[in-house]
Image: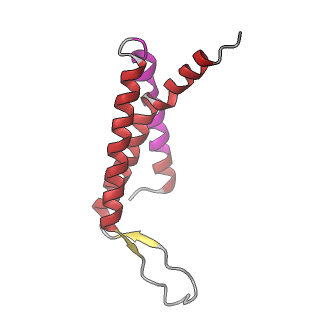
Amino acid sequence: GFDKNMFTTINNFVNFLSTFPAVILADRAGRRQLMLWSSMGMTVACMVMGVIGLLYYVPAPADPENPGAEAGYTISDKNAGWVIAASVFFFVFNYAYGFGPIVWVYCAEIFPLR
């Protein structure tokens, strides 16, 4: 799988690049459309992560050298880990062009400075 720093770097890069469609499409496609598509994409990503997690997230084997420690959990299939990682990136992509920036536009319109 990914190194923790590599995963975070890719995730932040996806977030950064995905905000540009919101800037370009907010007034062209409409805020409501962006939020609808964003919510559908986030729902799909969460469903995929949930199903894969239910199928492949299993208790880790106990460490014989440390009998009192909790073993934790692990992913039983390497490909399932990649699918979960891709689903996280897909979720962040959908959040970054919809619910991330558009909500702040609505807040500014509902509560103006003057």
Asked whether, in this view, residue 99 is left or right of residue 113, the answer is left
Report x, y in % for residue 50.
Answer: 36, 56
Dividing the picture into quadrants, the one containing residue 114 is top right
Asked whether, in this view, residue 39 is left or right of residue 80, the answer is right
Viewer-proximal residue among 7 and 34: 34
Report x, y in % for residue 99.
Answer: 47, 31
Residue 17 shows in this picture: no
Dividing the picture into quadrants, the one containing residue 44 is top left
- Asked if 88 appears above or below 58 in the picture, the reply is above
Viewer-proximal residue among 99 and 83: 99
Task: Please give the range of residues in magenta.
Answer: 9-27
> Main SS of the magenta segment?
helix
Residue visible at 49% across and 90% down?
64
- Asked if 3 appears above or below 26 in the picture, the reply is below
Report x, y in % for residue 90.
Answer: 36, 41
Residue visible at 49% across and 24% down?
102
